[in-house]
Amino acid sequence: MPDCHRLVGALLGSVRTAGEAIMAIHGDEVGLRAKPDGSPVTLADEAAEKILLAGLADVAPDIPVISEENADSHKRAPPDLFFLVDPLDGTREFLRADGSGAFTVNIGLILHGAPIMGLIFAPAHNRMFTGIVGANGGAAEWDGDSARSIAVREIPESGALAVASRSHRDDATNNWLDARHITQTVAIGSSLKFCLLASGEADVYPRFGPTMEWDTAAGDAILRAAGGRVEVPDGGDYPYGKPGYRNGPFIAYGAAF
């Protein structure tokens, strides 16, 4: 079992530096181009990945890394222990002109198919979240070098607040919400959706559209560490290390429904 507390402390600096590199490019010449699958990639994605991979190689050289921007790593069979890295989650949000800042830097750690540690930094909002699952773990939001514990909330009397994808909301999501009479929603991009649940600012995140494991691993770990859970829509565990590191539908819960 890796020392997740040591890893979180050692990786905070790299994650912040990656976020600073993204913000230095944000609003400037971003070098936008399309990857072979048609999704966008920018100079910011590449700059952040370089920083994160160097940081991971320094603090955990023996743990394999599956990173969004390293296509060769996607061909690797999932080992028992590995990192999932998304250097810029929410590239479409990064490219928006409205300044919402709903993009993040993500590092998740997977052990035996389950997320056990996550770091997420939203550089435009200067919000850093971490989570360690299991005994002596917990979730936190950081202010510089100081951390405060965060946890999911009970559903308020006014009803559950759902978070949904800003760029990928679909009929299946709307139908799921309608069936549960959930009328309050907020649209936001990237893994910030998990963080809002983990910090008690929202209650549920249904996702039926496509995602990849590096999109969700860090947020999944933080949410679980905060007392929430992620399941397949019919209930049951949501595993990692799936073929192609491709996710199916899931529901992330802040508290029991």
Image: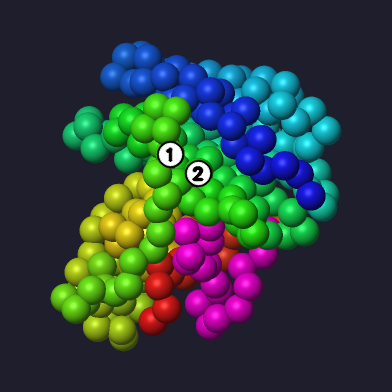
Q: Which residue is mark 2?
A: 130
> Magenta stretch containing residue 239, yes or no?
yes
- Residue mark closest to the camera, 2 vs 1: 1
Coordinates of residue 196 in the picture (x, y in percent): 34, 54
Per the rendered image, the range of residues in magenta is 224-240
Q: Is residue 14 visible?
A: yes
Q: How dense is the environment of label 1, judged by Cα within 10 Å: few (below 14), some, or many (20 and up)?
A: some
Task: Residue 201: give its label.
Answer: none
How is the structure coloured here? rainbow
The residue positioned 45% from the left and 46% from the top of the image is 140
Whether 198 is drawn above or below 90: the answer is below
The residue positioned 83% from the left and 33% from the top of the image is 62
> Magenta stretch containing residue 17, yes or no?
no
Q: Dots 2 and 1: beta carbons under 8 Å? A: yes
The residue positioned 64% from the left and 59% from the top of the image is 135
Q: Quadrant of residue 151?
A: bottom left
Identified by mark 1, the residue type is Ala
Identified by mark 2, the residue type is Thr
**Left or right position of 118 against 169:** right
Badge 2 marks a residue whose secondary structure is strand
Task: Residue 147: give its label.
Answer: 1
Residue toward you, 174 or 231:
231
Residue toward you, 132 or 190:
132
